[in-house]
Amino acid sequence: MSLRRARSPEEYAEWVKQAMFEVGDLKDCLLYEVEDLQRFPAYIEPLEVSIKQVYDAMVSGVYQFGREDLSFMDVLRRHEDQIPFHTLLKQINETHRKGLDVPDEG
């Protein structure tokens, strides 16, 4: 399956903002559902922190595209079936690694 990449910086930034919202929403839902916090999934915190790092880098203007996977991909690979927005995270990572999907001007 070929993942769609963002077509503009604005779309890419919107995807990262959406991922921030989604991880916060997932955390809130789990907190609401899990009465025994000892069972709270351990992957949520590292996922939230790594998405926030990307977001903060964009906001501060130091974000750079790269060839390496973003740090949240390790968490995603291990817990993909528990993360409802896994496709969004894969698209963010794909755009990070391959750049924006800008049509060739020819």
Image: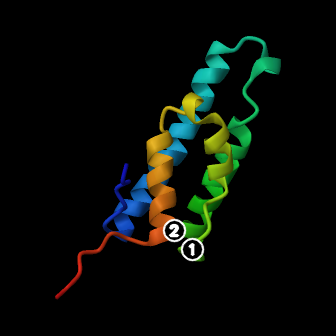
Helix, strand or loop at mark 2: helix
Q: Earlier in the sequence, mark 1 or mark 2?
A: 1
Q: Is residue 13 visible?
A: yes
Work out whether residue 17 can be spotted.
Answer: no
Report the quarter where the C terminus lies. bottom left
List x then y, in percent, for residue 75: 67, 44
Q: Which dot marks residue 16? A: none
Vertical comparison of 41 with 66: above or below: above
Residue shown at the point (60%, 77%) measured from the top left: 62
Q: Could you say which is closer to the camera, residue 44 or residue 66? A: 66
Mark 1, Cα crowd under 10 Å, few <14 / some 14-19 / many 20+, is few
Quarter of the image where one finds residue 40: top right
Q: Secondary structure at mark 1?
A: loop
Q: Which residue is painted at 45% across and 70% down in the image? A: 98
Of residue 104 and residue 60, the one placed in the foreground of this image is: 104
Left or right of residue 29, residue 10 in this image:
left
Cβ–Cβ under 8 Å for marks 1 and 2: yes
The percent coordinates of residue 33 (x first, y second) are 63, 14
Residue picked out by circle 1? 66
Residue kind at label 2, given as amino acid type:
Arg
Label 1, label 2: how far apart the Cα atoms are: 5 Å
Task: Left or right? Give the position of 101 relative to 76.
Answer: left
Quadrant position of residue 48: top right
Which residue does the image show at 63% across and 54% down from the upper left? Answer: 52
For image coordinates 72% across by 40% down, the residue present is 45
Q: Position of residue 34 (x, y in %)?
A: 69, 15
In the displayed structure, 106 sits above or below 19; it is below
Left or right: 29 as drawn, with respect to 1: right
On screen, residue 39 above or below 103: above
Residue of label 2: 97
Residue type (three-letter) at the residue carrying disc 1: Gly
* Color encoding of the figure: rainbow
